[in-house]
Image: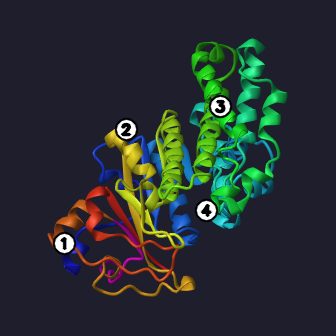
């Protein structure tokens, strides 16, 4: 089996990745089995630079807060802010602490200097303003959408005034209370005010859609796209908060699915801009159902963002999963030789791309067993799911 596996190995670069695919996809997604590994982030940066310079990709979308990401996009396209401030405030989930993300922003700004807008690199976060432990208040997104519409349309068209909207939103602390993730009774998501805000958000998004010709004539395409992002985020957050207050057995499954739905909607919107390179956890990008065990919950399953996007745009979406050999700082040592990672780890190269279809054919009807994970944050690949992968990237690790 090791000889057959070796025959499928190629170097990791943009040309090799593109040769695996029938055509250039509008969304080219490369996953990772865990977050925060420098080797994976450095590889992400290299691939995006090559895809930009050789294949015409002009947007990178990562698993970070979509609202915060606007500051990064402003910096790399127009120089708004400073590198230090943008890295500190433009990323969520601790991504600001990784040197590779700072380098990504620095490189994008340098690439864009002196280039016309249509040739510039863009940045997008495609996750919602969500953490595992809590969700953001809908205030920022909802008030930004309202402000955009109020500046362009007659006041009579708006379903609510600024003051009334502020009163309904109230303080942010109840919205962001981390206790609500484990205790639905602590959530304000099904209060009378929250339910009224859901209707208002829906009306504002509908108003935006009905006024697109006017808004395009009076503002820019970028401004309209941002307003659409505000609308998606406001309605998504209010829906998420509603289900945080739910007490049914399907509560956590619903929340996980809603997060990936927000991701999918953001990816589809970014894809309208042009060819986009996407980087996130494998579980968010795969075409199969995702699954996880959290706390004392039974196994939870939901459709990933990749599955939702692939169902919408077909071959315009491509997904390469990434596997890791070792993460020794987290107790992930050299893999057992009988596992998929073990077979790949035995090869001499430090990193490479593998044709998933050829690899699956080499295994035949008896794929190797999945590797066990000693750590919650690391998800080994399931060799039985190679049919849903366009390619496989392997990195030996530390």
Report how many numbered discs are placed on residues in the image: 4
Quarter of the figure with residue 122: top right
Mark 3–mark 4 Cα distance, whole angstroms, equals 24 Å
Q: Which residue is mark 3?
A: 201
Instruction: Name the residue: 48% across, 74% down.
Output: 378
Compared with residue 146, is residue 377 higher up or lower down, i.e. above or below? below
Measured as percent of width and height from the top left, residue 330 is found at 55, 83
Compute the Cα span from label 1 to label 4: 36 Å
Residue 383 is at least partly visible in this image: yes
Q: Which mark is residue 132?
A: 4
Going by the picture, which residue comes out furthest to the right? 163
The front one of 317 and 371 is 371
- Is residue 327 placed above or below 238 in the rendered structure? below
Q: Nearer the viewer, mark 1 or mark 4?
A: 4
- Element under label 2? helix
Q: Residue at x 55, y 68 (%)?
A: 35
For label 2, the residue is 312
The label shown at residue 363 is 1
Q: Nearer the viewer, mark 1 or mark 2?
A: 2
Q: Are marks 1 and 2 in contact (CB under 8 Å)?
A: no
Q: Say which of 139 and 54 sits in front.
A: 139
Q: Secondary structure at mark 4?
A: loop
- Mark 2 to mark 4 CA distance (whole Å): 27 Å
Image: magenta residue range: 343-353
Does the magenta-highlighted stretch encompass residue 373?
A: no
- Badge 3 marks a residue whose secondary structure is helix
Q: CA distance from mark 1 to mark 3?
A: 51 Å
- For disc 4, the neighbor class at 10 Å (few under 14, some 14 to 19, many from 20) is few
Magenta region includes residue 352: yes
Sequence order check, earlier mark of 3 and 4? 4
């Amino acid at each position: 089996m090791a000889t057959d596996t070796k025959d499928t190995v190629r170097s990791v670069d943009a040309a090799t990745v593109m040769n695996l695919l029938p055509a250039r996809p509008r969304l080219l997604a490369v996953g990772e089995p865990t977050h925060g590994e420098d080797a994976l982030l450095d590889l992400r940066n290299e691939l995006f630079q090559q895809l930009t310079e050789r294949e015409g990709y002009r947007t990178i979308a990562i698993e970070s807060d979509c609202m915060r990401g606007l500051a990064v996009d402003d910096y790399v396209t127009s120089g708004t802010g400073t590198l230090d401030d943008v890295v500190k405030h433009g990323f969520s989930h601790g991504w600001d602490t990784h040197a590779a993300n700072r380098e990504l922003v620095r490189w994008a700004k340098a690439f864009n200097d002196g280039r016309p807008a249509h040739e510039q690199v863009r940045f997008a976060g495609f996750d919602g303003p969500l953490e595992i432990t809590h969700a953001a208040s809908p205030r920022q997104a909802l008030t930004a959408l309202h402000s955009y519409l109020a500046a362009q349309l007659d006041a009579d068209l708006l379903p609510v005034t600024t003051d009334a909207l502020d009163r309904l939103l109230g303080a942010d602390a109840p919205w962001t209370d981390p206790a609500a993730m484990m205790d639905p009774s602590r959530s304000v998501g099904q209060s009378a005010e929250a339910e009224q805000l859901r209707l208002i958000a829906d009306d504002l998004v509908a108003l935006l859609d009905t006024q697109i010709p006017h808004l395009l004539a009076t503002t820019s395409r970028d401004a309209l796209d941002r307003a659409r992002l505000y609308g998606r985020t406001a309605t998504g957050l209010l829906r998420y908060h509603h289900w945080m207050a739910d007490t049914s057995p399907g509560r956590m499954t619903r929340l996980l699915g809603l997060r990936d739905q927000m991701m999918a909607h953001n990816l589809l919107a970014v894809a309208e801009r042009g060819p986009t390179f996407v980087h996130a956890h494998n579980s968010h990008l795969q075409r199969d159902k995702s699954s996880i065990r959290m706390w004392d919950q039974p196994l939870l399953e939901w459709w990933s963002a990749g599955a939702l996007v692939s169902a919408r745009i077909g071959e315009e979406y491509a997904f390469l999963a990434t596997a890791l050999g070792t993460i020794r700082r987290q107790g992930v040592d050299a893999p057992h030789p009988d596992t998929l990672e073990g077979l790949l780890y035995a090869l001499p190269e430090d990193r490479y791309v593998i044709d998933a279809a050829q690899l699956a054919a080499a295994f035949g009807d008896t794929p190797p067993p999945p590797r066990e994970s000693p750590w919650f944050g690391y998800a080994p690949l399931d060799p039985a799911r190679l049919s849903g992968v366009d390619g496989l990237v392997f990195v030996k690790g530390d």
